[in-house]
Image: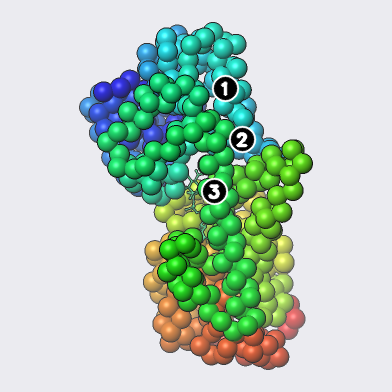
Amino acid sequence: MAEIAVIGCGQAGLVVATSFASLGHHVVGIDIDRRKIEACRDGVTPIQEPGLDRLLTEGLAAGRLTFLHEYPERIEAEFVFIAVDTPTSPSGACDLKALKSATTSLAPALRENAIVVNKSTVPVGTGDEVIRLLRLHGAYNASVVSNPEFLQEGDAIRNFTVPDRIILGGDDPSATARVAELYREFDAPIVQCDIRTAEMIKYASNAFLAMKISFINEMASICDVLGADVSRVAVGMGLDPRIGPKFLGAGIGWGGSCFPKDVSALEYAASLHGVRAQLLRGVAETNRDQRRQVLRKLRGVLGRLETARIVVLGASFKPNTSDVRESPALEVANLLRLSGAEVRVVDEHVLSEEVQAQYPQLTVTGDLLAAAQDADALVLATEWPEFLDLPFDDLADVMRRPLIVDGRNVLDERAVRDAGFIYRCIGRPNAEGQGASFNERDQRIGRDSVPTRNGRQPALASD
Ligand code: UGA
């Protein structure tokens, strides 16, 4: 069994550390955030990730997992994985401060022939800089291997233990072979290449997935005006093995800590070298526009949004994670607020402070019925399981208007309409009318077509 160090105990690092420990390796996790390390030592995961708690507790109990909040004088591990944050800087470039600082700190502590394995998503060419920094700070014979991660939040443990592929980029074949040995019990193809190519594979993969979503969202906008159903279009397309069914879910678009920063960093890197990455730009623009679909749908029924009360269901960037970074749900909530609506966000998995760090004017609650009191519409923005089975009768009793915009195309339209709600979704004709013609009918009859509940009078600004 190998001795492994993992630098950075965040979303990716902790999954890597606990998963290697669960395979029987000895792992030390190092992070300069003392609070994070103390939590890990106590068996408390600082992030929400299904299955991580168990792996952490088991690793600690077996004595295979230890944590340090400072770099030791000597790192005994043969493999030193780097999994630190590489966020976007204001220019759109990738911020490598944490990666450079980690490399500089660990270099003097490395043992002979250690292998530094980079898992952080980094611009193509960063491997060369890591080698330069290692040499500069005394690690004269350490090797560098690029081994990008393809972990999805909420499914990361499974992604690690049952990977689709393992990418190993390195210029020293014996170092690459030693890292490949670490993964020998995984039943996955190993792609070996040079460091730059490995770094590029990560960006290209994320950019392609983001493009797939933006593509289907653009198709959804076209379906909307032509009266076709984008969900069936996705099924029909996805059966072609050259296309595949995944990441064709139309909705309010992609977010999170990876796609936005990686698409932007790749476009930026291309522009530095004179390449106009027009497709990448379009992918990001379509995604931005997608948030506005919700406002269009609401206006189609309610008229103006000033003084309307809207409940946004979901705050996290996708279900099964409390992560709100670049969350489409919060961007929609904020756009609604900027349009003059009173907005309430419902997500019992997310802390208000986290939301307010990005959007000081937004609050989040776990109390759905209280939030829905006198509301004019619900917007399903994150498809948490509890939102797939909403108490429509109770909601209809407390809401001013029974209207729901399904921003993720996940609700059963018939059930929603049977409960007396008006239903709108993304890129699918409604049962009450077909595509464009129904949208036009909406515009003609405007909000008068929306029944009010409980004899309450609508209180829209245009009244
Ligand atoms: C993404 C990639 O999927 C991982 O392979 C990669 O390792 C990771 O980034 C990373 O670079 O670290 P993640 O950010 O966890 O993983 O999120 P995804 O599950 O990919 O979802 C991203 C966004 O796309 C979410 O906002 C989700 O709601 C949206 N999405 C996804 C859609 O709008 N439609 C879909 O069909 C699928």
Ligand 1 within 8 Å of the CB at mark 3: yes
**Amino acid of disc 3:** Asn
With respect to residue 6, does 160 lie above or below? below
Mark 3 — residue? 206
What residue lies at 50% left-to-right and 83% top-to-bottom? 421
Question: In which quadrant of the rendered view does residue 113 lie?
Answer: top left
Q: CA distance from mark 3 to mark 1?
A: 23 Å
Indicate the position of residue 451 as horizontal and vertical percent values: 57, 89
Residue 181 percent coordinates (x, y): 32, 28
Query: Callout 3: 10 Å neighbours few (<14), some, many (20+)?
Result: some
Residue 366 at least partly seen: no
The N terminus is located in which quarter? top left
Q: Earlier in the sequence, mark 2 or mark 1?
A: 2
State the separation of the CA atoms marked 2 and 1: 12 Å
Secondary structure at badge 1 equals helix
Q: Amino acid at mark 1?
A: Val
Please tell me whether mark 3 sits on a helix, a strand or a loop.
helix
Q: How is the image coloured?
A: rainbow
Within 10 Å of the Cα at label 1, are there few (<14), some (14-19), or many (20+) other Cα atoms?
A: many
Mark 3 or mark 1, earlier in chain: 1
Q: Quadrant of residue 21?
A: top left
Q: Residue furthest left?
A: 62
Amino acid on which disc 2 is placed: Pro
Q: Which numbered dot is residue 123?
A: 2
Q: Which residue is mark 1?
A: 130
Mark 3–mark 2 distance (CA, rounded to whole Å): 13 Å
Q: Between residue 27 and residue 229, name the one nearer to us.
A: 229
Q: Is residue 73 above or below residue 319?
A: above
Q: Nearer the viewer, residue 94 or 63?
A: 94
